[in-house]
Amino acid sequence: MASLPLAEAVASVLLTSVPKRDQPLVLDRLPGATVSGERLSPEIADAHPETEVLSVMVHDPVDADTLARFSRLKGVVTRSTGYDHLPLDHLRDRGVVVCTLGDYAVPAVAHLTLAFIIMLLRRVPEGMAVTQGRGGEPPRWDRSRLSGRNLYDVKVGVLGTGRIGGAVVRMLSALGVQVVGHDIVPDPALEQVQGFRYVSPLPAFLAECDVLSLHVPLAPDTRKLIGPVNLSRLPRGAMLVNTARGRVVDELAVERALRSGRLAGFASDVFSGEPDPPNLARFRDLPNVVITPHLGAFDRRTIVERYDRTVRLAEAILSGDEAVLVGHRIA
């Protein structure tokens, strides 16, 4: 296959979990590729044994057994920033190139994070509940109990200051907001941002956060990092925003903190069990909650960029163009 022209070689590219509305974007850029709306499965793998480059999404069940069915596999491109859903040890042992899309969604996720912070502080979800008459109440034009907080009067804590967290720091700092950060590997460039500072250890950082925004990857040491103990370290009445990974948060502990008043608000774009989170109902009757179905990278500009980068990386893997893979390759 390596000797084939690239136009013919793309027939060995398989993309799974591509919504029907997005499939023309792929086929326009990568004619001849196989594009499926279904999630990866052993059956799909068996139907496409010629696959050399596989592209998946975060909710694809990617396991060693399924990947082993692709005997000619050269590369895997996940159409995401995170890669906790991939069996990296298996792929590295096989010498398979593994790429993420890098910083393609940084602005989009950072913008949504800022929207969440403002919505919670200004009590937008509670205002909507009152004016729309949710929870069996009649619609009312009543703001008497909805006095919010101003961005200038709170301190926002950014937990995880990588690409997305760093963008959130810069956006908030540019607006004149007090921002503190915590990361196991501080970014020296961020330390030069006016009005921003790192705080360690983690308990001391949490104690300063009127709003806590999560931007850590999912790893063994971050799973349910925000649970009963760390929630108790936040100031009473703090607010929590999660645009990272659902499993970073103990959702039951968050529900309890909301009902007790320890948390004054919760906004999350991510949940454990995606794409079928089992625990959404527990937040249904809470008016100070914003829940969205993973909209962070779901604007038109970012969707197009997702497929543009996927195509460039797939072509680079097939052609052996290492220069294109720089900044995206994790194995």
Image: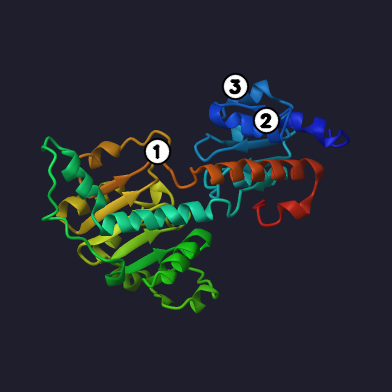
Answer few, some or many: residues within 10 Å of disc 1's Cα (few below 14, many 20 plus, some between 14 and 19): few
Mark 2: amino acid:
Leu
Determine the CA span between mark 3 and mark 1.
Answer: 22 Å
| Residue 292 position (above or below residue 208) | above
Residue behind mark 2: 27
**Cα distance between the residues tagged 3 and 2:** 22 Å
| Nearest to viewer (mark 1 / mark 2) | 2
Position of the N terminus by quadrant: top right
Quadrant in the picture for residue 24: top right
Q: Judge left or right: residue 164 versus residue 114.
A: right
Q: Residues within 10 Å of mark 2 (few under 14, many from 20)?
A: some
Tell which circle, 3 or 1, labels the residue nearer the N-terminal end: 3
The residue tagged with tag 3: helix, strand or loop?
helix
The residue tagged with tag 2: helix, strand or loop? helix
**Circle 1 SS class:** loop
Q: Position of residue 150 (x, y in %)?
A: 27, 66
> Which x, y percent locates residue 310?
65, 42
* Residue 43, disc: 3
Residue found at x 28% / y 52%: 266
Q: Which residue sits at x=81%, y=43%?
A: 319
Q: Which mark is residue 273?
A: 1
Query: Could you tell me if residue 183 is visible in this image?
Result: no
**Image-based side of 289 in relation to 308, left or right:** left
